[in-house]
Amino acid sequence: MSQRVRTSPDGSDRALSEAYDTALLDLDGVVYAGGSAIAHAVESLATARAGGMHLAYVTNNALRTPDAVAEHLTELGIPTGAADVITSAQAVARLISEQVPAGSRILVIGGEGLRVALRERGLEPVESADDDPAAVVQGYGGPELQWSRFAEASYAIARGVPWFASNTDLTIPSGRGIAPGNGAAVQVVRIATGADPQVAGKPLPPMHRETILRTGAERPLVVGDRLDTDIEGAFNGEVDSLLVLTGVTDGAQLLAAPPQHRPTYVDADLRGMLGGQPEVAAAGDGFRCGGWTATAGSAALELAGEGEPLDGLRALCAAAWTAAGEGGCELDAEKALARLGL
C-alpha cells in the first residue's frame, strides 16, 4: 500500500470488520477509560470477533503486563488472552535486545510491564545506576513513580549508558480526565541530561513491527483515538486506520490534521467497525456526505444541509484537507462544528 496525501475520509461498502482481517486496537480512550469500558465497546468487539475478525490490543502504556491487560479486558466482558496484547514495553525490549549482549543488565525506570518484557528477551532488569547497566529504559510508571527514579536514570545516562523509551505520549487518559504520560517523564530526564532516547512506541516503526510480528496480520486496520500516535503510526506503517472520537481528539483537531494525521475512516465509537462507511463525494466546489455539503471559504469552513453529525464532519474533513493539501488547515471551523454539536 502506497502512501498518499489523503484529501477525505474513505467510504466502504463492506463492514470494516469484514474488509480487514485484524483490528489493531488502542486501549486508553478507545476500549476503556480508567477502569471502565467505553460505551458500545464490549458489544461491538464481541460482534466483530464473532464475525471472524482477529482482535489485537496495542498500547503505548508500558506499565501493565500483557497478562494484566488481558485480565482487565476479560473482566470488562471482552475475553482476551495475553498473546492478543502488544505493548510498547515489548517493542522497546526487542529494540534493546538487538543492541546489547544477551543477559545484559538494564536499568528500569517504570513498572512491571517493562521488567516482564525485558526478561522475555533474556535481559536482566536492575534498579540502580550503580548496577553497571548496559542501557536505561524508561516507561510509564503510574502516578506513584518516585521522583528519585528520574535521578537514577540521569546518573546512568550521564555516564554514557544508552537510553531507551517505551513511548513519548505527553498525556494519558484516565477516568478523571487527562493526566501526564510517559512523554512528560521523558522530558524531565531529557532536561537533566541533554540526551535523547531511542523510542519504540507508536507512531514509530519498532511498535508497528512488533505488532505485525506478534499478530501475523495481513490486512490490519489500526483503530485509535490519537492522531499523533495511532493514526500517524498507521501512516508510517502504510496501513488503514479508523479514528474514534471517544478519546482525546476533537473535531477541530481532526480538521486541522496534516497528512500523516489523517485517518482513513472516522466514526463516533467502535460501532464504526461493524458497518460500512459513507462515501464522501465532490459536489460543485465542495464535498457532500449524507445530507451535508461542506466548502472551504476564504477564511472559514462552511457547512450546509442537515443529517447525521458525523456525515457533516466527514464532509468538513474533505473540504479542510483538500484546501490544506500537504499542510494543516488553518480555516476557522468553529461555526461549522457548532452546527454539528461537535
Image (cartoon, grey):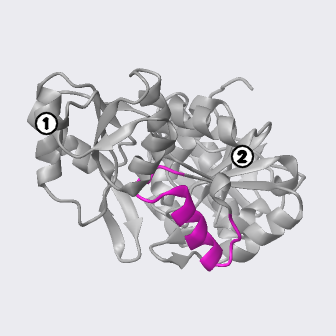
Left or right: 168 as drawn, with respect to 264 = left
Examine the image and state in which quarter residue 119 appears.
top left
Residue 288 position (above or below residue 74)? above
Of the pair 52 and 290, the residue shown nearer to us: 52
- Which amino acid type is shown beneath numbered disc 2? Leu
Q: Which residue is mark 1?
A: 130
Q: Whole-Å distance between the Cαs marked 1 and 2? A: 44 Å
* Foreground tag (1 vs 2): 1
Q: Position of residue 75 (x, y in %)?
A: 61, 78
Query: Where does the image place residue 328, in percent across and percent down from the top left?
Result: 46, 37
Residue 324 appears in view: no
Left or right of residue 63, residue 208 in this image: right
What range is drawn magenta here? 59-80
| Secondary structure beneath label 1 | helix
Can you tell which quarter of the image residue 124 is in? Answer: top left
Residue 276 picture location, percent across and down: 84, 57
331 relative position to 26: left or right: left
Q: Which residue is mark 2?
A: 221
Return the x and y of residue 60 as percentages of the image width and height: 46, 49
Badge 2 element: strand
